[in-house]
Amino acid sequence: MTNFEKITRSPEVLADFLNGITAVDCQWDHDFARAFCDDCPNEDCDKFKCPHMAEWDNPLWWLRQEAPETVALRKKVRALRAEATFQKNSRSNYELAAELNDAADTIELLIGGAK
């Protein structure tokens, strides 16, 4: 077994490994701030007062998040489905609606199913 295989056995094992690395500037910290702090009404927050304490400085939380590219593709899928509905209901363009839905289905298959 290689070191890579050992630390990537599961998200939990990888998170434990990442958590053991002393680093000031981690990707999960940046993503945590974007997800929770950017719109937080609390002005003076610390780890022990944060309502999202379980996710704070937690690489396992970060590992379970969808990659930004996947999030962007899911938005495109929703836009395709909305346009398909518009074409079907407002324009009676059933053929285009079907093609748009087929494209959305294909993207969903490529990114791992609907969410």
Image (cartoon, rainbow, N blue to C red):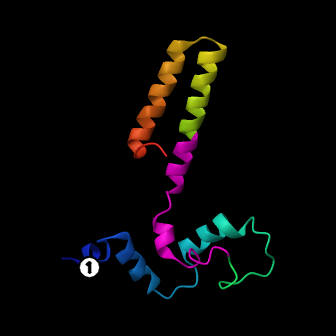
Residue at the limit of the structure toward the top, as seen here: 92
Residue at position x 61%, y 70% in the image: 32
Secondary structure state at the residue bearing disc 1: helix
**Looking at the image, is 43 positioned above or below residue 76?**
below
Mark 1 closeness class: few <14, some 14–19, many ≥20 residues within 10 Å: few
Total numbered badges shown on the rendered structure: 1
Residue 93: quarter of image: top right
The amino acid pointed to by label 1 is Asn
What residue appears at the point 59 percent right and 77 percent down from the top-left corner? 56
Residue picked out by circle 1: 3
Confirm whether the magenta stretch covers residue 71: yes
Q: Quadrant of the N terminus?
A: bottom left
Residue 113 vertical placement versus 40 (above, below):
above
Q: Position of residue 66 (x, y in %)?
A: 49, 57
Q: Which residues are magenta?
A: 51-75
Q: Is residue 5 or residue 53 the one in the foreground?
A: 53
Residue at the spot x=73%, y=66% of the render? Answer: 38
